[in-house]
Amino acid sequence: MSFKNLLGVSMLLGASLARDVPSNIRSFYNSIKSQGQCSSPLATGFYSEYNNDNSFSYCGDHLDDEQVIYITGNNGQFANMDIDCDGTQGSAADDGRCGNSGDTQSITSFADTVRGYGKGVRDLDANIHPYVVFGNVGSKAGFTEFNPQDHGVEPLSVMAVVCGDKLIYGVWGDENGDDGEKSVVGEASISLATACFGKSMNGNNGHDENDVLYIAFTGKDAVPGKNGAKWDAKNYDEFESSIQGLGDKLIQRIQG
């Protein structure tokens, strides 16, 4: 392949890393921010960081009209982006940045479903699959729980993430457990975080500002399923581009 053609392919694969935020999503983001806080929280009492207040909620303000759930805090805050490295370990896509994570687990919440797709993939790979950690589970006293499935969000459904001036598509791939000090929100796989904020992201260094909007879509039509995504992708670009069509369709629900 000539250098010119190679460059063209590289630019095509990299295009998903710099997708502009569409006007309807930008308006939606700004509207939520100016509103200040969620009017119809589905669950509240979560932290974005341990040293923040516990004003963060899974918001249902637009559950009925636009069939979405998102995370928001008081005073127009959204959530931060901690780094998740759970799932398949040591693949060719692993560049070592997850190595200093102190809480990596070798399995994600929906590994059985991924394996059941029969694509030769045993679980999500944080270095390949842009997934969002959404929902809170656990039995520790004082921890707040939230199950998105109770409100129509399906496992491995496509999600949209607004981070800075970018729109990234991912899947709901993991849940927050009760292994930490408090019930927290705002976490994504290292591949998604890298698409948002670059290679400074690693297993122990995420994005601290509460300005990331995570949008989950309800309904089975948000699930790419066995053949609607390239689960056996070898890198982030290959997987994210495989769900772009569905993501583009889903964001049309949002009028802004």
Image: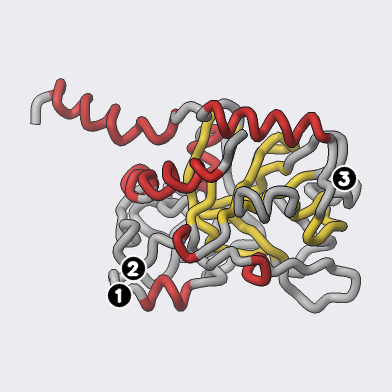
Q: CA distance from mark 3 to mark 1?
A: 42 Å
* Amino acid type indicated by mark 1: Gly
Could you tell whether 82 is left or right of 87 in the image?
right
Residue under label 3: 52
N-term mark: 3 or 1: 3
Residue 221, x across and y down, in percent: 45, 60
Q: Residue furthest left?
A: 1
N-term mark: 1 or 2: 1
Rendered image: mark on residue 226: 2
Residue 138 versus residue 206: which sits nearer the camera?
138
* Amino acid type indicated by mark 3: Asn
* Amino acid type indicated by mark 2: Lys
Residue 78, x across and y down, in percent: 74, 40
* Circle 2 Cα neighbour tier, 10 Å, few/some/many (<14 / 14–19 / ≥20): some
Residue under label 1: 118
Q: Given contact means CB atoms under 8 Å apart, are the residues at marks 1 and 2 in contact?
A: yes
Looking at the image, is mark 3 or mark 2 nearer the viewer?
2
Q: Residue, x 55% and y 42% (percent of image)?
A: 193
- Secondary structure found at label 1: loop
Q: Is residue 67 above or below residue 27?
A: below
